[in-house]
Amino acid sequence: MLIQKIGGWIVVLILAFGIGFGSGLMAISSNEYIQKKVYEITVKPVQPMEQSTNVKIVYPDPPSVQNAKTRWLVFGDIFFGRYIDDWSKNSAEKFAYPFRNLGSFEREKYDAWLAGLECPVTNNTVSSARQELLLEFNCRPEFLPEIKKYFTAFSLANNHIDNQQKEVGLKETREHLTDNGFQFFGHYDSVVTTDLCEVVSLPVRIEYEKISANIPKDIYSLPEKGEIPVALCGYHNVFKLPASQQMDVVKEYAMYFPTFVFPHQGSEYGTRSDELQRSISHGFVDRGADGVFGSHTHSIHESEFYKGKLIQYSLGNSIFDQQFNNEVTTGAVIDADISLTGENLNDWLDLASSCKAFQDTCLQAAQQKKLKKVDIQIEYGVLAIDGANKQWIKAGPEKQQMVEKRTGLPAGNK
């Protein structure tokens, strides 16, 4: 029997944890991410005629989550219609063709990849000639399983997402994205304020408070990974500027969630932001945004830290069929290393499972529970994507240096 091997030390152990035979079990944590193990030991009494007694030793409550870390790559505009569709059909890789070199960015180092999707995804057949002549974009859904190997969520706020019969094409796009496991946010018309911001659940790596050396390391079931809810907002500002009340939607989400805004705006092919871009982006930060990632111009703009928050005015092209100069075949990719802390991180981890569906009630749940926004710290770097010769690959030193100089950000992917 076990008592014959461990002798009298079991009594000392029981007293050390303040548990008598009649004290009952301590409450087990209800947090779905953390479970506490209960160890049961059979104790044989000294008198041989007495019955053996089972003693349950319950260790202290599990340690709290100390912080959650997540690392993202944020790309510029992605498009796989028009000539990319033609090139893919003529290639050996078919629908994997535009993404065949994305492994150069070492996807395994990141928890999530985000980008702007600048085309509706429908089953319509639109020739490259028509797309070129009328700028009536369309992307085929057959590409989605291949791009899902890399990307997590897309902004749908841009001037081409309405190219296939406006709401008809947008609805089909959302259906295809949902069927392929993507999360998404934004609308082509900022008047539809209910669609501007969306709470999504993104992967995190979890770190816990230090466990006492006197407690066995395997006593708790502590998962190393989870998900955290984050608010992502998309604004299409190409043809008209957002009204103040439309921008105020950001404030509503930023009270509770880490919040990032993806404005689609600016003059095409310029290399510096204009006054309107700066004013609008500052307005998002003034309303609580933790970062702003701009797009639309097909060229890279500078970055700015405004009130300590990064504004990247334009990321340029990431995957696009434009090939006519160095500007349009070079894009900036933001490397964001994010650390989240706060006394109620467990509550946010629990909430994340209900924040994956489009137009869910995650914001309302956070409001009802009066959850306190977590503290967020971000370290930023930048990478270059090279689309010359139809490659879409992590750029070499020359383009990397160009992107660092243009954005003012250090190299990422360290």
Image (cartoon, rainbow, N blue to C red):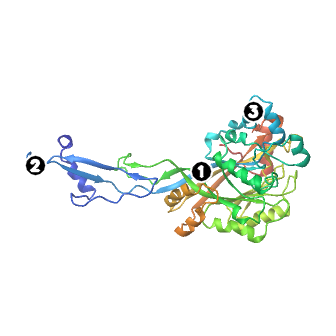
Disc 1 versus disc 3: distance between alpha carbons? 32 Å
In this rendering, the answer to whether 299 lies above or below 292 is above
Tell me the kind of residue under disc 3: Lys
**Residue 246 at least partly seen:** yes
Q: In screen coordinates, is 44 left or right of 387?
A: left
Quote the CA–CA distance across marks 1 and 2: 57 Å
Across and down, in percent, residue 183 comes to 65, 51
From the image, tell me which residue sits under label 3: 94
Q: Callout 3: helix, strand or loop? A: helix
Percent across and percent down for residue 380 are 68, 51
Q: Tag 1: residue type?
A: Thr
Amino acid at pointer 2: Glu
First in sequence: mark 1 vs mark 2: 2
Residue at horizontal 32 percent and vertical 59 percent from the top: 26
Q: Is residue 360 left or right of residue 48?
A: right
Dot 1: element: strand
**Residue at 87% across, 53% down:** 268
Contact between marks 1 and 3 (CB within 8 A): the answer is: no
Q: State the residue at coordinates (11%, 47%).
A: 46
Q: Quadrant of residue 284?
A: bottom right
Give percent across and percent down for residue 144: 70, 42
Mark 3 or 2, which is nearer the eye? 3
What secondary structure is marked by label 2? loop
Label 2: which residue?
50
Identify the residue under disc 1: 70
